[in-house]
Amino acid sequence: MKNYRILLLAFMISSAAPSCRSGLVTMTNGCYNAIEAGQRANKAGEYSKALDQFNQVLDQCKAYDAKEKGYAGKAAALNGMQQYTQALEAANQGLAINKASIDNYFEKANAELGLKKSADAKASFAAIIDLTQKNQNVKDRATIYAKIAEIDLKQNMYTDAVNNIEQAIKLDESNVGFYMLRGDIKTAQKDFKGAIADYDFAIAKGKDDYEAWKAKAFTYIKSYQEKYATADTKELARRLSQPDKQILCGEIAKAKAKGVKDVNMDLLELSLCK
């Protein structure tokens, strides 16, 4: 969740600055500087410090725009501290001031995810997309589509998940994490060949790490469990053809070489790869 917040933080900060210069809002320079200090603390992961800073903003700054940013910053700090109920309350207070506040909507969605309110979070992310259609920073919007796809996957809404991750990739083809997520969706759909192709693509584009190799290895395992109609380790070892056994043992070895550690994988290796 933190990665998505950081990706949008620059947009949130920039949305405050032009408003101050335009004369359409009334926050003082002192309040503006205090908000920026709090946002920097959130970005650095200093959530307790940020919470104190934004509580001071809300106590001392009376302008509606300062309070809107204050509640968003407070919600971000509380989300970072995993205090999701309080974060949701803060974000809703910010939205009561400005119902089109992107940063408060974003923190609201993150709090809802933390509270496992997936449907509510999806609606909040959809509202952000609607509010940012004219945003020139398409990478921000791509990240939101990917987050909605992740929610769809958790709810087993695979068609929606595919549509949203494809939209994310269309907007930002360079984000290898999107291909990983598409692979996860395909794995859930039992399109193992397609999933492995996505993991391989992500690895080739630079995600040559623990996460990618673990996902790929377990997708191979699931594909053979499906092919041989058993999830029992000993039975799978008995049924596997020699060519399939060589492929699977090779993938397990590659994953372990990348640092992947898993008890079930170790047991399967002991049974298969003697």
Image (tube, helix red, strand yellow):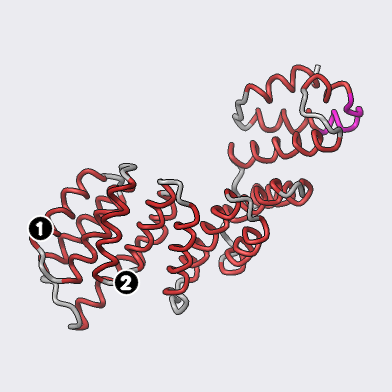
Q: Is residue 149 magenta?
A: no
Relative to 119, 235 lies left or right: right
Q: Which disc, if any, is residue 262?
A: none
Q: Which residue is mark 2?
A: 99
Quarter-wise, where is residue 211 in the image? top right
Residue depicted at x 12% and y 55%:
56
- From this view, report whether residue 267 is shown above or below residue 94: above
Q: Residues within 10 Å of mark 1 (few under 14, many from 20)?
A: few
Q: Position of residue 158 (x, y in %)?
A: 66, 55
Q: Position of residue 11 (x, y in %)?
A: 36, 67
Q: Which residue is mark 1?
A: 59
Distance from Cα at disc 2 to Cα at disc 1: 21 Å
Q: Is residue 245 magenta?
A: yes
Quarter-wise, where is residue 72 in the image? bottom left
In the image, the segment drawn in magenta is 239-247
Residue depicted at x 81% and y 16%:
274
**Main secondary structure of the magenta stretch:** helix
Q: Residues within 10 Å of mark 2 (few under 14, many from 20)?
A: few
Quarter-wise, where is residue 95 in the image? bottom left
Q: How many marks?
A: 2
Mark 1 or mark 2, which is nearer the start of the sequence?
Answer: 1
Relative to 13, 155 lies left or right: right
Foreground residue among 13 and 95: 95
Q: Position of residue 112 (x, y in %)?
A: 41, 52
- From this view, report whether residue 219 is shown above or below residue 206: above
Nearer to us of marks 2 and 1 is 2
Kind of residue at disc 1: Asp
Q: Position of residue 78 (x, y in %)?
A: 28, 47
> Mark 2–mark 1 contact, CB under 8 Å?
no
- Find numbered disc 1 in the image and state the secondary structure of the residue it sits on: helix
